[in-house]
Image: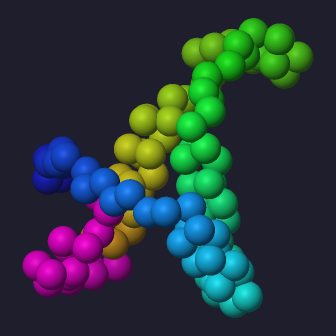
Amino acid sequence: MKNIVIRKAKIFRVADFILKATQSAVSFFEDSLNVSERLAFAEVTSSGKELNADMSKTLELLEMKNSDLTSLDNYLKEYYEQILKRLKEMEVDLDLEEKKRLPF
């Protein structure tokens, strides 16, 4: 298995109204509902509100330990590793320009 190269992510700042307009446009099509849901998540993360909260009561209620949780960084890393794995399994051959447009 090849080593995974970690590169600095390209970050694009987009105005909220553009995200909302795009979300509205793609939500009309069944094939792009996943995109619409991800854009809704972007709205939450771009709100500027602190997303850290005390989880002790929630963990107690769910009878879980803090070690049972996954950090967002680890989740996203695993998510994109799975995407890359599936692309390789499908033998997708992306040319250099297409690779530049991928978010990972």
Q: In which quarter of the image is residue 38?
A: bottom right
- Percent across and percent down for residue 5 are 14, 48
Q: Quadrant of residue 74?
A: top left
Please check the rendered image and state whether residue 90 is part of the magenta-colored stretch, yes or no.
yes
Q: In this image, 14 relative to 7: left or right?
A: right
Judge whether 72 appears above or below 100 on screen. Answer: above
- Percent across and percent down for residue 64 are 75, 17
Residue 53 visible to an observer of this rendering = yes
Judge whether 82 appears above or below 92 on screen. Answer: above
Give the tally of numbered discs: 0
Q: Which residue is drawn at 49% across and 40% down?
A: 75
Q: Which residue is drawn at 65% across and 85% down?
A: 25
Q: Which of 42 and 84 is in front in this view?
A: 42
Q: In this image, 14 relative to 29: left or right?
A: left
Q: Which residue is drawn at 34% across and 79% down?
A: 90
Q: Which of 66 and 89 is in front in this view?
A: 66
Q: Which of 80 and 19 is in front in this view?
A: 19
- Percent across and percent down for residue 43 are 62, 54
Q: In this image, 17 relative to 83: left or right?
A: right
Residue 85 visible to an observer of this rendering = no
Q: What stretch is highlighted in magenta?
A: 89-104
Judge whether 15 appears above or below 31 on screen. Answer: above
User: Which residue in the rendered view is the most extreme toward the bottom?
Assistant: 29
Q: Which of 39 and 30 is in front in this view?
A: 39
Judge whether 90 appears above or below 52 on screen. Answer: below
- Percent across and percent down for residue 89 are 33, 72
